[in-house]
Amino acid sequence: MAAGIKSALRSLADPEKARGGQAFFKEPVRFYGVSSAETRALAEKTYGQVKTIWGWEEAEALADHLLPDPYLEVKGVAVLLLGRFIKEAPPSLLEKAKSWLQADYCDNWASVDTLCPEVISPLLAMFPELLERVETWTSARNRWLVRASAVALIPLARRGKELRRAYATARRLFAVKDDLIQKANGWLLREAGKTDMTRLEKFLRAYGPAIPRTTLRYAIERFAPAKRRLLLSKTK
């Protein structure tokens, strides 16, 4: 199965797209130049071939095999396929996901931002007791694990769930200098404010001077232009 996925991606490769893809990343990333839509289609096609004979264990084993591959699209198919089996996965899968992040198998923002909503966030929704473990990732040395501590909460926060934890996580990440963490943190705050903009505004006013400007600019994107200008001024 792994060989077939890699072969299919190579057949879809577009060298021009591959060269252009690097513009979206500061760290070096290897691409076949396969579009996101084509990557998802391949994952869906593969799922159709195995859904009656596989369970989450086989999908996890395939991810274990494919995630060390250097190509972004290979990692993407592995995670998307595992996501199709997530409803039957046990809470122990969180530790496996953590190990992939720590090993730098998801060594770019795009891979982290696929792993979180496809695997980690659904696990948190199914097993809320795991939230405390993810909260500890905010102090990790691995930047991808730290980014995941914020991104994994976004699907919950945008539905108005676990807002206390989302804001607590955001506070802990204010001290992190990494711009990819600052952007993820602003994204988390923006989504947390989606169901309660007043709460978000109060939070930003309360912690304004401590908030990195990158984080703040992401967090205020849904406010009206005049309100954004006011918050930028009042939080200096």
Image (cartoon, rainbow, N blue to C red):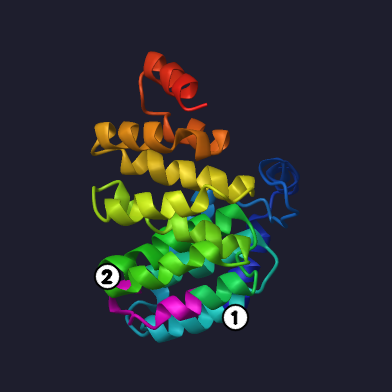
Reading the chain from its start, which is encountered first: label 1 or label 2? Answer: 1
Q: What is the tally of numbered marks visible in this picture?
A: 2
Residue sitting nearer the eye, 214 or 221? 214
Which residue in the structure is indicated by mark 1?
Answer: 65
User: Residue flagged by tag 1: what amino acid is it?
Assistant: His
| Corner quadrant of residue 132 | bottom left
Q: Residue at the location (56% across, 38% down)?
A: 212
Left or right: 163, with 11 as reference point: left
| Magenta region | 84-97
Q: Is residue 175 magenta?
A: no
C-alpha separation, residue under disc 1 versus residue under disc 2: 28 Å
Q: Is residue 119 left or right of residue 126?
A: right
Residue 220: give x, y in percent of width and height: 42, 30
Q: Position of residue 91 (x, y in %)?
A: 34, 80
Query: In the displayed structure, would residue 184 be above or below residue 91?
Result: above
Residue shown at 75% from the left, 54% from the top? 28
The residue sitting at 41% across, 16% down in the picture is 225
